[in-house]
Image (cartoon, rainbow, N blue to C red):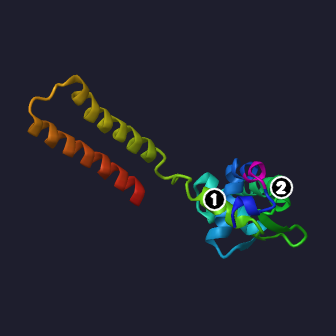
Amino acid sequence: MAIEDAAIGFDQLFEILKNQRRRRVLQYLIENDGEVTLDHLAEEIAARETGKDIKQITSQERKRVYVGLYQCHLPKMDDYGAISYNKPRGRIEMGEHTSLFDRYLAVETDETEPGLTRYHSTLSLLVGLLLVVPVVVGALGSNATLQVITALLVGGLVGVSAVRLLR
């Protein structure tokens, strides 16, 4: 379903996506059969936020996430159709518009390697500058040398782009 065809607008879509805990709710539902209890979801998100195993989180860490989900995030997500939240039963399922969020969640970077995107971008920029500056300044002598260096630099850009794409 395209956003243009849905009853949810861009403002509502990004209102949901701007909060990391809401994104984690959607990611969990998409990755795990589309339904979960509030208790289990609170444990999963608390574990992810603290970087601990589920068995290691404290009741205070779990409660902090549970209360935030229960009072704020899940009702708002349910109102927008991002999820279906049965408050009395404590059940959360994929909503009418959950599929709209999938494409935006896929772009979120892997938390275990936060600097990798910056690394690739910086490397691509440096390689690009190394390609352009000698040509503009005319620092390279023969055409054969220029062609070899240009081929190597363009190959470097392609390699960096391929690594980023395949990651």
Q: Give the side of residue 92 with respect to residue 138, left or right.
A: right
Residue 78 visible somewhere in the drawing: yes
Give the total number of marks visible in the rendering: 2
**Circle 1 is placed at which residue position?**
47
Disc 2 secondary structure class = helix
Q: Residue at x 83, y 62 (%)?
A: 78
Q: Give the side of residue 107 with respect to residue 164, left or right.
A: right
Measuring from the top left, give residue 113's x and y in whole percent: 46, 50
Question: Is residue 132 within the magenta segment?
Answer: no
Q: Give the quadrant of residue 86.
A: bottom right
Residue closest to the eye, 6 or 34: 6
Q: Residue at x 70, y 73 (%)?
A: 34
Q: Amino acid at mark 1?
A: Ala
Q: Give the side of residue 111 with respect to residue 67, left or right.
A: left
Label the magenta part by its dominant secondary structure: helix
Instruction: Please tell me how crowded label 2 is: few (under 14), some (14-19), or many (20+) other residues with Cα within 10 Å.
Output: some
Residue 44 visible somewhere in the drawing: no
Q: Give the quadrant of residue 89.
A: bottom right
Q: Give the side of residue 144 with respect to residue 38, left or right.
A: left
Report the mark closest to the observer, 2 or 1: 2
**Circle 2 is placed at which residue position?**
76
Instruction: Please tell me how crowded label 1 is: few (under 14), some (14-19), or many (20+) other residues with Cα within 10 Å.
Output: many
* Mark 2–mark 1 CB contact (< 8 Å): no
Q: CA distance from mark 2 to mark 1?
A: 23 Å
Question: Is residue 10 within the magenta segment?
Answer: yes
Q: Which residues are magenta?
A: 9-13
Disc 1 secondary structure class = helix
Residue closest to the eye, 111 or 62: 111
- Give the quadrant of the N terminus: bottom right
- Give the quadrant of the C terminus: bottom left
Q: Residue at x 56, y 59 (%)?
A: 106
